[in-house]
Amino acid sequence: MHRFFVQPASIANDQVTFPPEISRQMNLVLRLKPGATVTALDGLGNEHTVELREVNSENSTGFVVKSGIVSTEPKTHLTILLCLTQREKFEWILQKCTEIGVSVIVPVISSRSLVQSSRDVESKSERWQRILREAAEQSHRGRVPELKASMKFNESIHLDEISTNMRLIPWEDEKTVGIREALQEGTTSEVTLLIGPEGGFSMDEVSAAQKAGFLPVSLGPRILRMETAAVTAAAIVMYQRGDMDMGSDQTPG
C-alpha cells in the first residue's frame, strides 16, 4: 500500500485532502483510481488507511477507513550533528539515517567541511526535506526526521536541545572507549552523535566538543569514510538500545 505524509490539518472529520505534489504523483505516476486504498501519515506518529474518493493532479481526496499508531518509530531519540560534504554523499547519508531511525539531523559547518557557506545549504533545503520524506515513507516510519538549519561547529555542540543527551563523538584517534561500551554505560533514550567531515575534526574541535560534554568513542580499528561512520554509528546506537529488535514495544518518541 502506498504511503504518503500529509500535514495534520489535511486530515479532518475522517476526510483527507492530499496536496498537489502528492495528487500529481497519485494521478500521473501511480495511476491510482477512486476506490484505491493508501496510507496517510500525519507526521505525529499516526497512520490512516484511506479510500480514495477523487483523484486528480490538484487535490485528491479520500475518507478514513481505519486509524492507528505507527509501531515502527524507535524509542531512542537520536540526533546527528552531521558535517557538510558534497551533495550526493550528504543526501545519501540523509536517506540512510532516516531509514535507520534518526530523529533530528543538523547540518554542521566545521573547519574541514567541504561546504563552508550556509547559503549553499539553504538552497538545497527543500530538496533535502523531500529526500527525508520519501525515505520515511519507503521505510514505513511514522515521522519524518527534523532537519535543522545549518550552523557553525561551535554553535552546534552547544545546542540547548542536546544538553541532557548522551553525547558521543566518533573519533579515529580514540583508542580506549568503544561506542558499544559507552552506550552500555548509559541508559538515556536521547543520544547525540557528532559526525566529522572527510578530513576529520581538528584537535581544537575535539577539545571543544569534550568541554561541551561529548565523549570521544571509537568505531573500531579500521578507518571509516564519513558516510560509513555516520550510518554505522547510527545503526549501533539503535541496535544497542534495542530498536532493531523484532516485536519490541515501540511508541513514537
Image (cartoon, helix red, strand yellow):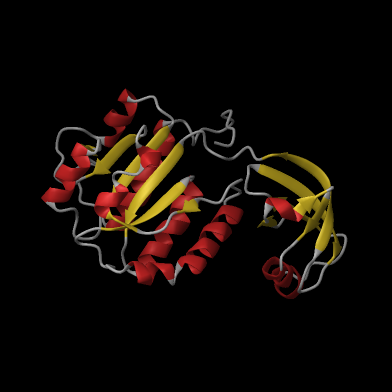
Residue 220: quarter of image: top left
Image quadrant holding the C terminus, namely top right
Do we see residue 114 in this rendering?
Answer: yes
Percent across and percent down for residue 194 are 30, 47
Q: Nearer the viewer, residue 103 or 183?
A: 103
Q: Point out the residue furthest to the left here.
A: 203
Residue beneath the point at 19% across and 55% down: 200
Residue occupying the point 47% across, 66% down = 125
Q: Is residue 87 visible?
A: no
Kindly identify the residue that appears in the image at 28 percent across and 45 percent down: 157
Tell me the quadrant of the picture where the N terminus can be found. bottom right
Is residue 68 shown left or right of residue 233? right
Q: Residue 45, located in which quarter of the rendered image?
A: top right
Above or below, 141 against 92 in this view is above
Q: Position of residue 31 (x, y in %)?
A: 77, 71
Residue 152 horizontal/vertical position (percent): 28, 57
- Locate residue 225, reporting x and y percent: 26, 57
- Depth check: give the residue in front, 182 or 212: 212
| Residue depicted at x 81% and y 43% | 66
Along the horizontal axis of the image, is 145 left or right of 163? right
